[in-house]
Image (cartoon, rainbow, N blue to C red):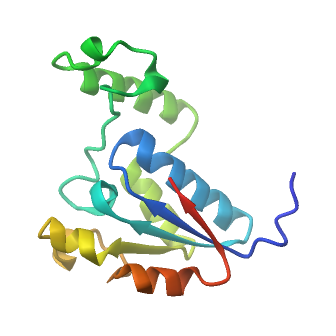
Amino acid sequence: MADTAAIEKVSIIVSKGSLEGVYPALIMANGARAEGIEADLFFTFFGLDAITKKRWNHIKLATVGNPGLHLPTLLGGLPGAPDLITRYMERRMRKLDIPPVPEFIEMIADTGAGIYACKASVDLFELGKDDLVEQVQGIITVGEFYEHAVGGQIVYT
């Protein structure tokens, strides 16, 4: 295992609201906390879906234009394809004990990780604090995010 003693803090930017956009950030934040590394998650643009009450239970895999699926775009765009492939991936993740997005965010927040929403994105999508899950510690500006990130690594997923 790599020496993580030099890494004391990581700030992860989540900008995509798809399954493959949200999970890497959650896994990285969880891994950081498990190693004793301070971690903050900053949800911006469509990444807000993962912390929006109406959406966090409905994160789907992007099936159109996703080269990692090795699926022709036409097939990915068929009605029902996103739901089918998302359910398949969720079953595979459950077998590996990877929790669903809401449970994962709760778990990470319980470890002391910071969960923040981007003010510009919240304003853009006309959301308020009441629209966000209770684990969100604040709606902050990019400048405030950088203040939180001082002294650490910034990771963009």
Residue 116 place in picture, x, y as percent:
39, 74
Residue 14 is left or right of residue 97, and the answer is: left
Residue 10 place in picture, x, y as percent:
63, 70
Residue 106 place in picture, x, y as percent:
43, 64
Residue 135 visible in image:
no
Residue 37 drawn above or below residue 60: below
- Along the viewing direction, whichever of 90 and 147 lies nearer the viewer: 147
Tell me what residue is drawn at x 43 percent, y 28 percent: 89
Residue 118 drawn above or below residue 44: below
- Along the viewing direction, whichever of 34 and 65 lies nearer the viewer: 65
Residue 65 place in picture, x, y as percent:
34, 27
Tell me what residue is drawn at x 34 percent, y 56 percent: 47
- Along the viewing direction, whichever of 116 and 99 lies nearer the viewer: 116
- Along the viewing direction, whichever of 96 and 68 lies nearer the viewer: 68
The number of numbered discs placed on residues in the rendered structure image is 0
Q: Name the image quarter holding residue 151.
A: bottom right
Residue 50 is left or right of residue 104, and the answer is: left
Residue 26 visible in image:
yes
Q: Name the image quarter holding residue 91.
A: top left
Tell me what residue is drawn at x 22 percent, y 71 percent: 122
Give the farthest residue toward the left.
Answer: 126
Q: Name the image quarter holding residue 81.
A: top left
Tell me what residue is drawn at x 25 percent, y 74 percent: 120
